[in-house]
Structures are given as structure tokens and as C-alpha cells.
Amino acid sequence: MDYLRLFVIAVIPGIALAMGLYLTDRYDREPVRLLLKLFLFGMLSAVPTIAVERFLSNLNFLPGILSTAWTTYIVAGFTEEYFKRLVVMKVAYHDYAFDEKLDGIIYCAYSALGFATVENIMYVVSGYDADPYIGLYRGLLSVPAHMLFAITMGYYLSLAKFSPDPEISKRYFTQSLVVPMLFHGTFNFILLARIPLLMLLFIPFVIYMWIVNLRKLNRFYQESKALNKPDL
């Protein structure tokens, strides 16, 4: 097996999406050193994430569909989104460069794509023998999904940072974890529950996530454009 080829296949989606987001941030681009740091620490966050996921999985004594819900919403959804957000809080939240709302989306996406890249490497390299198309599936669905969860996270995290009302800021901060966790959990739950009728909702749900999150991204993009585009 050509492990180098599999490695390249696994890392391309995350890097491509990261570059796309960097180019999207046209009017007040973030420092490259900060983005690389977020991506790197996002990759490293896979280590504690795996440890906590194993611990929580061992607590799963629920039957049937409840067991699947625990695995998708708590083990994966909560744990992964918590550590991806923790990276942003430690690395970028108080950085001077975090000076507009679009930045929160960019930072969360870089952390998430770093994590998703490590996760993708593990799945593609270990799963290729069982499914040679696993890199394609994950490149089209799973890695972009991590970015979409991160857009939601960054949207609410920016609203929390720039809200003048402490109570409203706390509410947005809570939403910055809960809402992407719900998106993440639902994405995984539909795939793992093995309910044929539920599977019919998967593509509409993915389309819904794209529409909702691109609207969030565009809202802050337009704000950035209005703030930073020089008057002619």
C-alpha cells in the first residue's frame, strides 16, 4: 500500500478549504503565523479528544438508539467541538488580530480543519483496505462538515466577543458550543443510526447546513467589507 499517496489524499481537503477561507477574508486578512498556529494546535487537539472520547465511550451503557445518540452527540459532538473551540480560546480569542466578527469564523475553521485533517489521515490510512473510496467520501462530506460546524461556532463566538451586554455575551458563548455540537451530532447520528427513512434526510440536512452557514459567513464578510474597503 502506498501510504504516502493515502496521506496526500487525506490532507488535501483540509488544506484546500483552509486556503479557500484565507482567500475569502479579502479585506482584513489574518496573520499567517496565527492561522498556522491554529491549524497546528487544531491537529494536536486530536490527542486529548481521542482520550476523552474513549473515556466517555466506556460510560455508554445505554441500549439501542440511545447508545447511538450518546456516541454521536456526546462522545463525538460535544468532545470534538469543545476541544476545537478551546484551541481558539487559548490561541486567538484575546489576540489583537481578533478585531472583527469574520475573524471568529476564520479562526474556528482553521482549528477545526487542523483537527479534521488528523482525523482524516487516521480514517483514510486505516480504512483504505476496507473501502478504497473512503478518501473521496470523507473529502466531500466529513472534512467540509467540520468546516461548517466551525462556521457556526465562530459566528456565535464572535457575537459573544463583541457583544456589549455580558448576559447576552454569555448566551452567545454557550451557543458557540451547543449549536455546532447539535449539528455535528445530527450529522453523525443520521449516518450511524442505520434507519433507512432517516438516511433520506441526510442530503437535505447537509444542504441545509451549507445554506445556513454560508449565510452566516456572508453576513460577516459583508460587515468586513463595509469596515475595511477604502472609500473611492
Image (spheres, grey):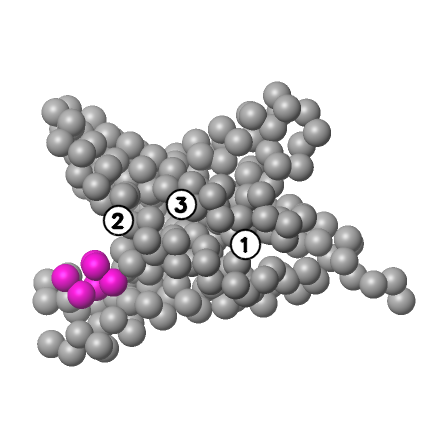
**Magenta residue check for 2:** no
Spot occupied by residue 187 in the image (x, y as percentages of width and height): 33, 43
Spot occupied by residue 52 in the image (x, y as percentages of width and height): 24, 37
Sort mark 1 into few (<14), some (14-19) or many (20+) by Cα contacts within 10 Å: many
Sort mark 2 into few (<14), some (14-19) or many (20+) by Cα contacts within 10 Å: few
Magenta residues?
121-126
Sort mark 3 into few (<14), some (14-19) or many (20+) by Cα contacts within 10 Å: many
Q: Mark 3 points at which residue?
A: 84
What type of secondary structure mainly makes up the magenta span?
helix
Spot occupied by residue 196 in the image (x, y as percentages of width and height): 22, 42
Figure check: 4 above or below 111 = below
**Element on which disc 2 rests:** helix
**Element on which disc 3 rests:** helix
**Element on which disc 1 rests:** helix
Spot occupied by residue 185 in the image (x, y as percentages of width and height): 33, 38
Looking at the image, which residue sits at the far top? 167
Q: Name the residue under label 2.
A: 47
Query: In the figure, is residue 26 to the left or right of 134?
Result: right
Viewer-nearest of labels 2 and 3? 2
Q: Name the quadrant of the C terminus.
A: bottom right
- Confirm or deny contact between disc 2 and disc 3 (CB under 8 A): no
Disc on the earlier residue, 3 or 1: 3
Viewer-nearest of labels 2 and 1? 2
Q: Mark 1 points at which residue?
A: 106
Looking at the image, which residue sits at the far right? 232
* Disc 2 to disc 1, C-alpha distance: 22 Å
Disc on the earlier residue, 2 or 3: 2
* Disc 2 to disc 3, C-alpha distance: 12 Å
Q: Residue type at mark 3?
A: Lys
